[in-house]
Amino acid sequence: HTHTPHTPQDADGREFKPQQNAVLYFIDGCLGQSLRTITEEGAMDLPPEISVLLLSLSAPFLLYAINQLPFLQDPQVILALVVAALTTVFLLANRGMKSAAAPDPLFYVFAVFSFTSVLSLTNALQQDGFIKGFMDVYVGKVEPHLSSAHGILLSYWEGLVHFLLLLLIIHRMSEGKSFRNLALLWSGSMVAAQTVLISGMIVGKYNKNIPPVIWRSSLSLIGSVWTAVKLLSRPRELSIIPADKLEVLQRRSLLSRPVDLLLTLCLLGNIAFTAFRGFVVLECSLDACFSYIYQYEPYMKDSVGFPKLTMLVFLFYAVPLLWACVLGLLTPGCSWMLDWTLVLAGAVAQAQWTHLGASLHSRTPFTYRIPKDEWSQVMVLNLLSLAVPVLLALRCHIRPAFFLQSQPHTPTTNGRKQR
């Protein structure tokens, strides 16, 4: 009998071209083999962070297939493929954790977001010309805002900083160590990123393609908020400090704590600068506001909408938190500072990186970039605005005694005070 080789066909019965066949075989050989390696029994018994890394690295293959195969290039098909890929990552992560006793449900959240982080890194590398052939169709038909300067800088942050944080979190989870601090940093960063992104897509120039893209950002926002709520609802492991020593430390005034005094002054300056920039984007009529937006940060006028939304998020969310942190440095026993300073640091670091980087990027029109004559002043102000919340979070965790709640002194049987 003669054997007729089967030629793959698309939904309309048309045969794939040789190039498309090659793409299919390449994906099946590389991606399929990597997934089979992960799922085949427990022979390899890879650490969870390595399994998640391998699963995440399959993201570029999916993007390459979408970019090369015409029958995958419908927006609804692309969305279905991405959902299927995220579901597959979730199921494979669940299979890899079967050996663990009752794994933390947050593990699956971190595994799925690791996959999306690699998607973001792939976008950043292509938009800046380091690679090609991966994101043309996806960006053109699903998320066009990813080609903006804001989208590129955000993609770098998600693909590098978020991905590293997520792998470290998963590693610490597998080792039975605390991952609370790293996870709160990630949550704060993610919530700030998605809040600005969703708002900017609605009010900016990319609002013509909202339905296909809003779902991913909304799910990302919901997942990061749920993670933060889950972590904040869990009791924190606090250091054990003798009651007498804790009482002495918390009696000290702000003037006798030079580091806290300096941080308080920096926070007040940061509040003033952040509020001022909020008034600038709200088109305040003061001459100082008019001069600043035209002479120092014209990027805040860009029609993409993201810089304006960033300043408004700072004004309405960061400023109240900064004021609360000032009160936390003045009042002993504010244990919430240990958690919320991490959330604030992650949010401000991400937003400042994206805003400052986008105002310098070549995708931003030249007239909106930081003027050359004012470059150093704008850089210093923005970097100080980024550094203050980060330094405050470090201070709270290096020396947390002032923020611990003192317990009432109750004598023990031998007459000594309890710790």
Image: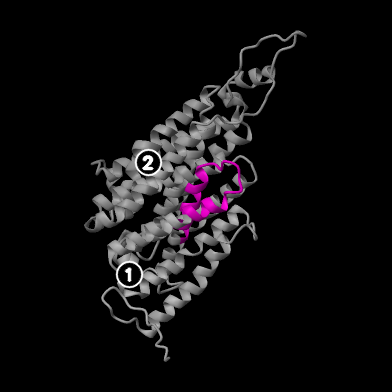
Question: Is residue 315 in view?
Answer: yes
Mark nearer the viewer, 1 or 2: 1
- Rendered location of residue 226, percent (x, y): 42, 39
Q: Which numbered marker is on residue 72?
A: 1
Q: Which numbered marker is on residue 136?
A: none
Instruction: Determine if the magenta segment contains residue 143.
Output: no
Quadrant where the C terminus is found in the figure = top right
- What is the span of residues highlighted in magenta in the rendered image? 90-118
Label 2 near label 1: C-beta < 8 Å?
no
Instruction: Determine if the magenta segment contains residue 93.
Output: yes
> What is the secondary structure assignment of the residue under circle 2?
helix
Q: Quadrant of residue 416?
A: top right
Outermost residue toward the front in this view? 1
Question: Is residue 266 in view?
Answer: no
Outermost residue toward the bottom in this view? 2
- Rendered location of residue 371, percent (x, y): 37, 59
Is 110 situated left or right of 249 in this image?
Answer: left
Outermost residue toward the right in this view? 414
| CA gap, disc 1 and disc 2 | 40 Å
Q: Earlier in the sequence, mark 1 or mark 2?
A: 1
> What is the secondary structure assignment of the residue under circle 1?
helix
Q: Is residue 26 positioned above or below 48 on the image?
A: below
Q: Is residue 247 positioned above or below 34 on the image?
A: above
Quadrant where the N terminus is found in the figure = bottom left
Q: Amino acid at mark 1?
A: Leu
- Look at mark 2 in the image and give the residue it sits on: 314
Is 108 situated left or right of 100 in this image?
Answer: left
Mark 1 surroundings within 10 Å by alpha-carbon count, few (fewer than 14), some (14 through 19), many (20 or more): some
Q: Residue at x 23, y 41 (%)?
A: 285
